[in-house]
Image (tube, rainbow, N blue to C red):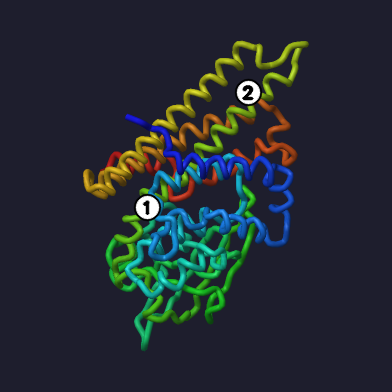
Amino acid sequence: MNFDFTEEQTMIMDGISRYVREEYDFDVRRIIKDSNDGYSKEVWRRFSELGWLSIPFDEVYGGFGGNPDDLASVMIELGKGAIIEPYVASIVLFGALINESSNESLKKEIIPKIINGDYKGSFAYIEEQSRFEITDIKTSATKCNGGYTLRGQKLAVIDADKSDGFIVSARTDSSQFSTDGISLFLVEPEAQGVSLSNYKTMDGHSASVITFEDTFVSDENLICAVGNGYSHIKSVMPQILLALCSEALGIMETLNKLTVEYSKTRTQFGSPIGSFQALQHRMVDNFMAYEQAKSMVYRGLCEANNYSSGSIDLDEFTRVAHAVKALVAKSSKQIGDESIQIHGGIGMTDELNIGHLVKRLMMINVEFGDGDFHQKCFGQN
């Protein structure tokens, strides 16, 4: 089988790689990270001009009409550059949920704005008690005249302070842990009763605690049919997990490359540390861990194509995505730990990009569940 990316995908990857190398090096990233906005509006505009914001969206709304392979090619290269802009929150998470929405009027309104760089979004699903269980929801949506009243609180909403809208999971029926009775709503940050408490995350992004106090949401802002929220999330979760794992793959490749280069220049006892057999073995182990993760990500992308063609069902696709996330979490922890160890103390400082890359890996590993969680989910399916 041919596992190479297509010519079109390779062109996109080369373009992102060139952009990162020439316009978004580590020093530029640090300046953007420490700015008041926490991201660059100019960079986001460039992403739109270059078509990177359009990748996963349907052509009917002005999108590229890309599949998981296309999105993976973008995420690998963005991972190598440790891009601080809210691509994951707005395009991978919010974008996937809105793109598969049954609310056509909402899609026609929102998606072109996302593609043009005029709209950013976030997915608000985590609650204080829920940990990795998406169905553990206390936030309520009570039916009222013309819509619903939201009450509750969401934690760790990534890049919410940059967002023009949130997709919020809330209970319209059933018990706290049921997969039934979950609905998804599009809520604007300016809506009455919405308040945000923002903070920085370890990887340089931001997160927010969002509180909803009797916030009115109209029926027109339902993402999917009432009570079908979990099914909607489940339908897009495998492609979300593959996109995150693709980003992690790009980071792991960069960490291995930087570590090998460092071992050739850092001397100890009059010799480059790369000449020490013990460290050579550890770097080979890192290379093998990366190759294993790469193989699993490619396996997941193959199954994504099989799912699109109808060869497998959603449950099987989801099971493979769990396996990919579990192995990527294991490999990325090994590569991250070893990269820091081989670099020594300097690897933990803000002055070197190694620590920033490792921190981003750590955040990816816990997003939508850590390795143990996905290993458990794989075994249950």
Q: Quadrant of the N terminus?
A: top left
Q: Amino acid at mark 2?
A: Val
Q: Which residue is mark 2?
A: 260
Task: Determine the CA span between mark 1 and mark 2.
Answer: 35 Å
Which image quadrant for residue 263? top right
Q: Which residue is mark 1?
A: 237
Horizontally, is 367 left or right of 254 in the view? left
Q: Position of residue 291 (x, y in %)?
A: 46, 27
Residue found at x 58% / y 39%: 80
Q: Position of residue 269 (x, y in %)?
A: 76, 11
Which image quadrant for residue 319? top left
Q: Is residue 307 above or below residue 161?
A: above
Horizontally, is 4 left or right of 377 in the view? right
Residue found at x 75% / y 17%: 267
Label drawn at residue 98 = none
- Considering every residue shown, the one lying at the far bottom of the view is 145
Horizontally, is 30 left or right of 118 in the view? right
Q: Amino acid at mark 1?
A: Met
Residue found at x 68% / y 38%: 353
Which badge, 1 or 2, comes first in the chain's sequence? 1
Q: Position of residue 295 (x, y in %)?
A: 40, 31
